[in-house]
């Protein structure tokens, strides 16, 4: 499994955990559309966006 895939899955799990805790303490119940949206957002951001930003940052330092 590539580093990008691992980072995407780990971030999605962390986003899900934090979202479940936050939503439960704020609303008193788990709102699944919010949780699923944050899981998808975490996966997309850490699989596609963050590696692109890091690549551009490394290129700018040279």
Image (cartoon, helix red, strand yellow):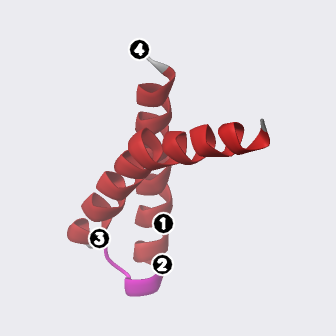
Magenta segment's dominant SS is loop
Residue carrying label 1:
21
Residue receiving disc 3: 34
* Residues under numbered marks 2 and 1 in contact, where contact means CB atoms less than 8 Å apart: yes
Asked if the residues shown at circle 2 and circle 3 are in contact, with their CB atoms under 8 angstroms apart, the answer is no
State how far apart marks 4 and 1 are (Cα). 29 Å
Within-10-Å neighbours for mark 2: few <14, some 14–19, many 20+: few
First in sequence: mark 2 vs mark 3: 2
Please provide the residue range marked out in magenta. 26-30
Q: Which corner quadrant holds the C terminus?
A: top right
Q: Is residue 49 magenta?
A: no
From the image, tell me which residue sits under label 4.
1
Give the mark nearest the N terminus, 4 or 1. Answer: 4
Towards the viewer: 26 or 47: 47
Q: CA distance from mark 4 to mark 2?
A: 35 Å
| For marks 4 and 2 on the same chain, the one whose residue lies earlier in the sequence | 4
């Amino acid at each position: 499994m590539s580093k990008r895939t691992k980072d995407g899955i780990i971030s999605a799990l962390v986003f899900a955990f934090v979202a479940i805790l936050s939503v439960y303490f704020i609303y008193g119940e788990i709102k699944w559309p919010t949780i699923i949206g944050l899981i998808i957002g975490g996966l997309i951001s850490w699989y596609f966006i963050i590696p692109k930003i890091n690549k551009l940052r490394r290129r700018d330092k040279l």
